[in-house]
């Protein structure tokens, strides 16, 4: 059993923040520590909070190592895109001269950054940085050639 001594100010802070923290995972941690501060046995804390013994011990060790600040910190790895370093230049380029297709956008990204992505990934990336893909309607077969060229110049 892990023994921890709690100050009255820490108990009051746990009581308040266990309901107000925006992340439910942190709320669960704070609930477990609050019950520990009130003197509940580990079996009851596990049942009330809905965690295993190993998880409860990890919560308590987090608190021992860094206090409430460490308990509120989430250490989940988040992948970083290879295109993140080029986001500003790609965004300005596509705003100045939009791509006519996702395939063209993928090729331009590959030429500019050296990073190859599938059309689906490029479409999702463009949407993520705030650019939307515009679908162009079909041009009738017997249309005016001059109008078609003018339309292509505009897009």
Image (spheres, grey):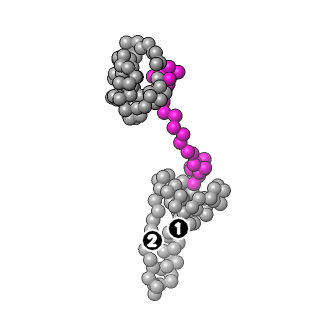
Residue 100 disc label:
1
In the image, which residues are magenta? 61-90
Our reading of the magenta stretch's main secondary structure is: helix
**Whole-percent x and y of residue 128?**
48, 52
Residue at the image position 37 percent from the left and 12 percent from the top: 8
Element type at marker 2? loop
Front residue (pair 111, 27): 27
Instruction: Decide which of tag 2 and tag 1 comes sooner along the chain.
Output: 1
Q: Quadrant of residue 90?
A: bottom right
Whether residue 84 is in magenta: the answer is: yes
Whether residue 70 is in magenta: the answer is: yes
Element type at marker 1? loop
Residue at the image position 53 percent from the left and 21 percent from the top: 65
Residue 136 disc label:
2
Does any portion of residue 39 appear in the rendered image? yes
Marks 2,1: beta carbons within 8 A: yes
**Whole-percent x and y of residue 7?**
41, 12
Does any portion of residue 95 appear in the rendered image? no
Front residue (pair 56, 7): 56
Residue at the image position 54 percent from the left and 59 percent from the top: 122
């Amino acid at each position: 059993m892990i023994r921890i001594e709690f100050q009255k100010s820490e108990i009051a802070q746990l009581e308040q923040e266990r309901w107000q923290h925006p992340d439910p995972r942190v709320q669960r941690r704070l609930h477990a520590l609050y019950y520990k501060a009130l003197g509940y046995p580990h079996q009851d804390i596990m049942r009330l909070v809905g965690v295993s013994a190993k998880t409860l011990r990890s919560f308590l060790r987090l608190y021992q190592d860094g206090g409430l600040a460490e308990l509120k910190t989430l250490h989940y790895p988040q992948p970083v895109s290879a295109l993140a370093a080029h986001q500003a230049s790609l965004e300005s380029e596509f705003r100045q001269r939009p791509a006519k297709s996702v395939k063209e956008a993928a090729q331009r990204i590959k030429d500019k950054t050296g990073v190859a992505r599938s059309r689906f990934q490029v479409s999702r990336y463009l949407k993520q940085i705030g650019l939307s893909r515009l679908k162009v309607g079909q041009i009738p077969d017997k249309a005016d050639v001059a109008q078609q060229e003018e339309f292509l110049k505009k897009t």
